[in-house]
Image: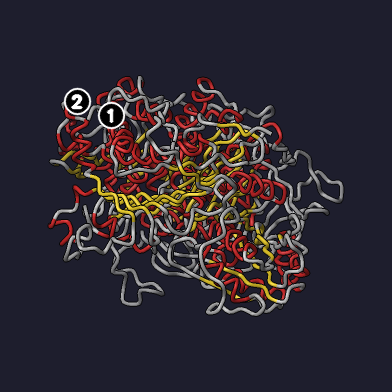
């Protein structure tokens, strides 16, 4: 097979090739060994798909080990991509297409492939040794166990090696490009544009042009294989989605969050200072921000988590927008400093990209079990605002909103992202940078003593927001000392006076409780639902998808998504009380539901799962059906979602 | 290889932000002369009677005006402990933070605000126990801040437990049978962390304390000044041997470029005792008993000599070296961080819209 002369940029349809079948949505999962480049493969397919104009949502799923032992189940890395011709909200429950690069990837993922699904297998790795290693007694390609699926055995390594024969690369180097062969094959099957991938490869391997060409050859070989072999008779088309008009790009949650922090610097007019310590899955925010110094962003990789937040707080004291980024274990370490920031009443943004816990837990998997840590994880009464984005793109807006609250109310703010948002991606309607608004840091410049003297009272509060003045060092006449000891109301000097402490504790709580946040909105298209599903953070997607499914079956169900977790929207209690049933699905053991029940005395129900993976729409559909009139989880309608109304 | 040698080699690759030399170079100067009173806050000082902190506070209050910088551009940040109340008593900007973390807060402030003179006030427990990690990293990073380490070899605020600088065998509330912990030597720790400025003074020796503080302020980079002081309540008289009649036989003051001689004056007017090398260590000898060429001349640029001198001070205080052990120029973290930001601003575009757009966008028509 020659590959060099194929023009993959313009896919030919000769008359003997059957017309592509159309699909509204497709879920593809690439699975292989950690060293097989599955994340890169998935990422490229995502870019091609984004460029093509589908709506999409992705779920990377990889082990914490950088290179787990090759060919083992713990070493399996996968990337799932859901794309559609309409707006979707989840990365999909089950793949329509599974690409398995080795037996371990097959074993770990085949359970998710529905009967009739397409299975593309790299047969070269199905050796006796590899099969035995993961406990296959017989070769599943031969023992009939894969009969329910449309199996396409492809000797990807052999074919890749053949295609690269003339490049002079070693056998080992040549075989490493087999992920691009797989990408080429899938790109052909789904009519993905390939210019972007070729350009990407040329840039990625700019210093090793021979590798760039080898990968491009492998990519084209995969494409040509699909076109010429009779194994794949059908290709599929998924038309571009009809999204809101505008300019779009693909974005991950961590990138959007980093951009949001850059933008927050612009919006507030403050220099941004990030103090951080590497931790999965938050490190990419540090990496991204370290590239944007031109935007007056300083990044500081500290000696530990505590130093990261300490330096950020020091920068805030000096008039910067202090930011620290971490995950749950890091928040635990930072707690004392966050408490100090509560006492100092200085702006500070703490980003917690949640992962599975407790302790080291599941570093690369998602969970939302840090809500109560964010809410209460400090000594004393130490309230602070909490915000959680709902999708990768929403991380951008959430970061700006968190900074607005931090600066306006002089308070630390915790932003709760999670692993699924951080690494997941979606098309993002690029905001107009000139329309992001402004927040005036309103630095103190004059003495403010109520008695008209020339004194400065650092804890004299704004009557409206209860925020204290922010006087930065270098401002003449406003020299003052602040600290973790209790301060006298107004004047700010040390005070151990009992009534003063009681007053200050209540004032700090009142300030946070009084932060103005938008009212909560219920989504109940048909009206008249008596079940309300309340979610927060990344469960937004599966909850909306699950609700669409049950609505598609003719049921009524309402949803409400909480972005502000402290304070809650002012109208929340009233909304909760107006439904017969309130159901709160969470990726923890019921943390939001505990807050809602305690705060509003509603008998909210909880549905929880902590598997390290997002909810599936089908799973929530079944749960929702169980709460609807006249049905029960065991008797409710089940099955695939109706086309076009799905996640 | 010294930093000065490395710099040209690295300079082409990385802007090391080599010191503009003075520690106060970017800090605005005061328009009018200031006095100790200007630096005194309205807060009543609440240390125990006889506490060494009073002497240090008095020295610092009268020292600060001599720097000639604007009061409002002076910031003191402390941790937790008796000495960490220090900022409340100075009419500058200040923060009384949390246990051990002052260097982190001061680092963030110093990196973002080159126009400030940033001081950290800490104690032996604060700096060397709970905050040990931050201390060594601040020192190796060489951020332009000055650390005053008040060492009274005891936990005072928590009422008398042994500290990481308490001598072995010390009986305290938490060590009724005597401490079994081997103590830190703060000067050795700092030099081991490659601190660019390391000095030591005794609280009651105002002249030497002021001289070391002055040199620390003028140093660009992190300066560590260990101040030996007594806790009259829980460790009274712990440094008495360095204050009493025999002190001149114990204290070894250092002056850059001068022979290391101490004790009662000999015929040549210098001290009777001298420090000489003995293999890779140092020892104290009678000056008259050795060839004068063997007597070491202090060189604050010499890291190895500084470390060897720090080892002369043992738990028993038989010989205690004071003055400036080390004072060298090395690129500072904060200057380098700012010059990277400046270089990025000069070179790169700060067009937010183009950042948000990225490289691959598509348009959905209305």
The kind of secondary structure element at disc 2 is helix
The span from disc 2 to disc 1 (Cα, nearest Å) is 9 Å
Horizontally, is A356 left or right of B260 in the view?
right
Looking at the rendering, in which quadrant would you find the C terminus of chain B? top right
Task: Give the colour scheme of this rendering.
Answer: secondary structure
Q: Is residue A318 visible?
A: yes
Q: Residues within 10 Å of mark 2 (few under 14, many from 20)?
A: some
Give x and y (percent) for residue A567.
70, 61
Looking at the rendering, in which quadrant would you find the N terminus of chain B? top left
Give x and y (percent) for residue A277.
43, 48
Q: Is residue A369 visible?
A: no
Question: Farthest front residue?
Answer: A16
Horizontally, is A75 left or right of B207 in the view?
left
Q: Residues within 10 Å of mark 1 (few under 14, many from 20)?
A: many
User: Looking at the image, which residue is at 81% across and 43% down?
Assistant: A454
Q: Is residue B299 above or below residue A491?
A: above
Dot label at residue A217 = 1
Give x and y (percent) for residue B83.
52, 56
């Amino acid at each position: 097979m020659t590959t060099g002369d194929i023009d993959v940029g313009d896919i030919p349809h000769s008359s003997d090739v059957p017309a592509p079948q159309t699909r509204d949505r497709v879920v593809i999962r690439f699975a292989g060994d950690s060293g097989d480049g599955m994340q890169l493969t998935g990422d490229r397919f995502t870019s091609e798909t984004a460029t093509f104009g589908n709506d999409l949502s992705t779920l990377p799923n990889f082990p914490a080990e950088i290179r787990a032992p090759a060919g083992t189940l713990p070493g399996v890395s996968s990337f799932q991509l859901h794309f559609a011709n309409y707006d979707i909200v989840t990365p999909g429950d089950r793949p329509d297409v599974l690409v398995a690069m080795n037996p371990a990837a097959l074993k770990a993922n085949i359970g998710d492939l529905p009967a009739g699904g397409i299975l593309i297998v790299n047969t070269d790795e199905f050796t006796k040794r590899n099969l035995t290693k993961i406990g296959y007694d017989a070769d599943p390609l031969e023992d009939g166990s894969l009969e329910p699926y449309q199996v396409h055995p492809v000797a990807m390594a052999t074919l890749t090696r053949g295609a690269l024969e003339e490049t002079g690369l070693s056998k080992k180097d040549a075989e490493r490009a087999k992920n691009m062969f797989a990408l080429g094959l899938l790109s052909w099957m789904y009519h993905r544009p390939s210019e972007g991938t070729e350009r990407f490869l040329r840039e990625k391997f700019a210093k090793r042009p021979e590798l760039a060409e080898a990968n491009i050859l492998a990519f084209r070989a995969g494409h040509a294989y699909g076109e010429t072999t009779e194994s794949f008779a059908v290709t599929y088309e998924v038309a571009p989605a009809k999204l809101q008009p505008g300019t779009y790009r693909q974005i991950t949650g961590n990138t959007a969050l980093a951009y949001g922090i850059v933008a927050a610097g612009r919006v507030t007019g403050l220099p941004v200072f990030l103090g951080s310590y590497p931790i999965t899955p938050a490190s990419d925010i540090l990496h991204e921000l370290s590239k944007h110094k031109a935007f007056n962003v300083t990044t500081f990789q500290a000696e530990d988590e505590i130093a990261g937040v300490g330096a950020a707080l020091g920068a805030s004291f000096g008039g910067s927008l202090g930011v620290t980024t971490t995950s749950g274990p890091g928040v635990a370490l930072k707690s004392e400093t966050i408490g100090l920031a509560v006492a100092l009443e200085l702006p500070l943004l703490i980003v917690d990209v949640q992962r599975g816990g407790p302790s080291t837990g599941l570093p690369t998997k998602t969970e939302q079990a840090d809500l109560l840590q964010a809410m209460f994880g400090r000594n004393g009464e130490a309230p602070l605002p909490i915000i959680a984005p709902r999708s990768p793109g929403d991380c951008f807006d959430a970061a700006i909103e968190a900074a607005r609250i931090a600066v306006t109310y002089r308070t630390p703010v915790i932003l709760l992202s999670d692993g699924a948002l951080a690494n997941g991606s979606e098309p993002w309607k690029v905001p107009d940078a000139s329309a992001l608004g402004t927040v005036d840091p309103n630095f103190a410049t004059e003495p403010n003593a109520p008695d008209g003297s020339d004194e400065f009272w650092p804890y004299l509060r704004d009557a409206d927001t209860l925020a204290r003045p922010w006087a930065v060092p270098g401002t003449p006449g406003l020299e003052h000392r602040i600290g973790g000891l209790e301060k006298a109301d107004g004047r700010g000097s040390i005070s151990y006076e009992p009534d003063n402490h009681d007053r200050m504790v209540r004032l700090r709580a009142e300030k946070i409780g009084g932060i103005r946040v938008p009212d909560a909105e219920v989504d109940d298209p048909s009206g008249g639902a008596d079940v309300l599903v309340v979610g927060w953070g990344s469960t937004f997607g599966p909850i909306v998808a699950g609700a669409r499914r049950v609505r598609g079956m003719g049921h009524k169900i309402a949803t409400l998504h909480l972005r502000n977790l402290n304070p809650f929207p002012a109208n929340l209690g009233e909304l909760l009380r107006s439904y017969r049933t309130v159901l709160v699905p969470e990726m923890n053991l019921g943390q939001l539901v505990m807050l809602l029940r305690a705060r509003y005395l509603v008998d909210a129900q909880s549905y929880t799962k902590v598997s390290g993976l997002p909810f599936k729409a089908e799973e929530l559909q079944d749960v929702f059906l169980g709460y609807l009139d006249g049905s029960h989880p065991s008797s409710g309608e089940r099955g695939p979602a109706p086309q076009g109304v799905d996640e | 290889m010294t930093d000065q040698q490395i710099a040209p080699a690295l300079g082409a690759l990385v802007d090391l932000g080599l010191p503009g030399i003075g520690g106060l170079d970017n800090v605005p100067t005061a328009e009018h002369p200031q006095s100790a009173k200007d630096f005194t806050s309205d807060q009543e000082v609440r240390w125990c009677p006889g506490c060494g902190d009073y002497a240090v506070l008095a020295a610092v209050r009268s020292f600060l005006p001599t720097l000639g910088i604007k009061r409002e551009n002076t910031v003191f940040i402390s941790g937790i402990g008796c000495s960490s109340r220090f900022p409340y008593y100075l009419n500058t900007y200040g923060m009384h933070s949390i246990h051990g973390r002052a260097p982190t807060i001061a680092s963030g402030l110093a990196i973002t605000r080159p126009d400030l003179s940033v001081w950290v006030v800490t104690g032996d427990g604060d700096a060397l126990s709970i905050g040990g990690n931050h201390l060594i990293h601040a020192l190796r990073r060489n951020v332009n801040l000055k650390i005053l380490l008040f060492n009274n070899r005891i936990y005072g605020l928590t009422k008398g437990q042994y500290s990481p600088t308490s001598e072995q065998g010390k009986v305290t509330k938490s060590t009724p049978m005597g401490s079994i912990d081997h103590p830190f030597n703060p000067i050795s720790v700092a030099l081991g962390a490659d601190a660019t400025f390391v000095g030591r003074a005794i609280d009651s020796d105002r002249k030497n304390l002021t001289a070391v503080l002055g040199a620390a302020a003028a140093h660009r980079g992190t300066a560590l000044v260990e101040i030996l002081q007594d806790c009259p309540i829980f460790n009274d008289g712990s440094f008495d041997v360095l204050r009493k009649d025999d002190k001149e036989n114990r204290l070894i003051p250092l002056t850059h470029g001068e022979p290391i001689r101490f004790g009662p004056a000999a015929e040549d007017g210098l001290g009777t005792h001298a420090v000489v090398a003995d293999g890779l260590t140092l020892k104290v000898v009678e000056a008259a008993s050795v060839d004068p060429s063997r007597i070491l001349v202090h060189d604050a640029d010499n890291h190895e000599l500084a470390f060897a001198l720090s080892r002369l001070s043992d738990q028993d205080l038989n010989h205690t070296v004071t003055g400036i052990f080390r004072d060298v120029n090395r690129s500072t973290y904060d200057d380098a961080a700012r010059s990277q930001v400046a270089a990025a601003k000069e070179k790169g575009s700060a067009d937010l819209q183009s950042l948000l757009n990225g490289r691959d966008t598509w348009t959905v028509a209305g």
